[in-house]
């Protein structure tokens, strides 16, 4: 491989995409196309990067299977950075096997990291953890070790294991310093800020306060009765009752939990659960049916007692009821939370990550756009959504430094 290609590859490995482009910007041979695609991706020109990487994959000959596989891995990273979560996982897995067979340990490992990051984004924590467990961090370069620890920290944060998340981020910091890549250091700093930022709101007897990750972990480990509005779960002392697929029941138990130990009137419950201002006899009958269903679901942990005006929540063993809500209490907070990473998302990717329909996401985005909380760019299938202003560092592209080398 010629000296300019080697020099460009070293520049990319050091986090200097401009330096790489200065050496190969006008070249159209396959290795140069691959390097240019990587450099454009690191600069945030994701559409151009994707086109260059595809051109490079086509330009490599039939005997250059490793080089083509590296292009597939890089294109998958571009898709992940642009939050195109529907990219073909089978193609990435085939590329990983090719790289592993030919002894390219670092890039084969990076392909697994991409798989685990995708699983993390769409909430499949068990799959993300299993994918990481197959990797030996002793055999990968510092940049890949940083990614490994970042994904592990993300998993532990989702599982509310704060101590383990901090330990993973400490190891990520050490690896990023060793890698000497500014983008990696910024990624770790962003994760640390997330870990130290408010994670939820606690509502007890009408009073609210913000909680950090450590506070939330301690709360869930305590014997109190928790109505978890972040995950739509009711839990106490290790017992959890999922209500994500029964939104009316969860709305009712949240209303009762926020008012505890006071009662909630029938009119207030009807207005909140059914979104109706006036309560007639048919709505009262519907409320009785839903309350009956709620009683059966909550039977292991609590009762719902009748009062002259309405209903009251009565935990069986807990002495206190706490509602755990998102830090920002608005209907579309989950969409805003995903857009808070600073990347641009498609509606299909948001729907996949939230486990809901694309039309539901579109309605939420339209409402948020009307309030100027999100903005869109592009048209048709290329349309993407993001927050209009993001404080701090955004998630940074982490491409294999050795992409065209081999």
Image (cartoon, grey):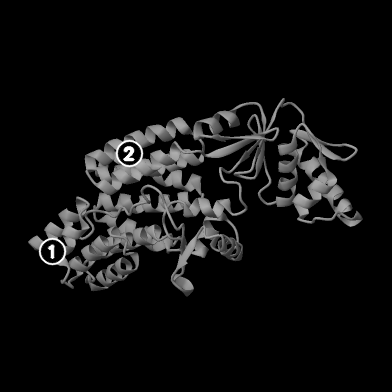
Secondary structure of the residue carrying tag 2 is helix
Query: Which image quadrant is residue 3 in?
Result: bottom left
Q: Earlier in the sequence, mark 1 or mark 2?
A: 1
Q: Which residue is mark 2?
A: 172
Residue extending furthest left? 3
Horizontal side of 374 relative to 291 (left or right) equals: left
Question: Residue drawn 41% across and 57% down?
Answer: 343
Of residues 210 and 213, the one nearer the viewer is 210
Residue 173 percent location from the top left of the image: 31, 37
Horizontal side of 346 relative to 405 (left or right) equals: right
The quarter of the rendered structure image containing the N terminus is bottom left
- What crowding class fits label 1: few (fewer than 14 Cα within 10 Å), some (14-19), or many (20 or more)? some
Horizontal side of 15 relative to 199 (left or right) equals: left
- What crowding class fits label 2: few (fewer than 14 Cα within 10 Å), some (14-19), or many (20 or more)? many
Question: Residue drawn 40% across and 49% down?
Answer: 391
What label does residue 84 carry, if any? none
Question: Residue drawn 36% across and 60% down?
Answer: 76
Q: Which residue is mark 1?
A: 23
The reply to whether dot 1 and dot 2 touch (C-beta < 8 Å) is no
């Amino acid at each position: 491989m010629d000296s300019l290609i080697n020099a460009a590859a070293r520049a990319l490995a050091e986090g200097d995409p401009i330096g790489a482009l200065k050496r190969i910007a006008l070249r159209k041979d396959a290795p140069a196309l691959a390097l240019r695609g990587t450099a454009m991706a690191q600069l945030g020109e994701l559409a151009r990067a994707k086109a260059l990487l595809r051109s490079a994959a086509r330009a490599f000959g039939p005997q250059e299977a490793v080089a083509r596989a590296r292009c597939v891995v890089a294109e998958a990273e571009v898709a992940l950075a642009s939050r195109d979560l529907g990219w073909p996982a089978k193609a990435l897995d085939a590329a990983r096997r090719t790289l592993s067979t030919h002894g390219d340990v670092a890039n084969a490992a990076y392909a697994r990291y991409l798989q685990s990051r995708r699983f993390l984004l769409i909430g499949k924590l068990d799959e993300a953890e299993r994918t990481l467990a197959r990797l030996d961090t002793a055999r990968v370069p510092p940049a890949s070790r940083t990614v490994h620890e970042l994904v592990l920290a993300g998993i532990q944060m989702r599982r509310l294991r704060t101590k383990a998340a901090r330990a993973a981020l400490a190891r990520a910091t050490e690896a990023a310093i060793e890698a000497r890549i500014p983008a990696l250091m910024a990624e770790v700093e962003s994760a640390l800020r997330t870990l130290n930022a408010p994670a939820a709101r606690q509502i007890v007897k009408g009073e609210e306060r913000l909680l950090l990750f450590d506070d939330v972990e301690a709360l869930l480990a305590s014997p109190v009765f928790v109505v978890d509005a972040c995950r739509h779960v009711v839990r106490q002392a290790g017992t959890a009752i999922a209500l994500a697929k029964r939104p009316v029941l969860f709305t009712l138990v949240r209303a009762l939990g926020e008012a505890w130990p006071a009662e909630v009137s029938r009119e207030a419950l009807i207005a909140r659960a059914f979104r109706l201002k006036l309560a007639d006899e048919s709505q009262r009958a519907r409320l009785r049916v839903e309350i009956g269903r709620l009683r059966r679901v909550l039977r292991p942990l609590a009762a719902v007692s009748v009062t002259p005006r309405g209903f009251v929540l009565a935990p069986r063993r807990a002495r206190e009821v706490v509602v755990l809500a998102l830090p920002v209490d608005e209907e579309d907070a989950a969409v805003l939370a995903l857009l808070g990473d600073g990347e641009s998302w498609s509606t299909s990717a948001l729907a996949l990550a939230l486990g809901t329909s694309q039309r539901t996401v579109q309605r939420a985005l339209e409402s948020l756009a009307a309030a100027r909380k999100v903005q869109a760019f592009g048209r048709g299938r290329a349309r993407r959504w993001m927050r209009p202003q993001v404080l701090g560092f955004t998630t940074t592209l982490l491409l294999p430094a050795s992409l065209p080398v081999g």
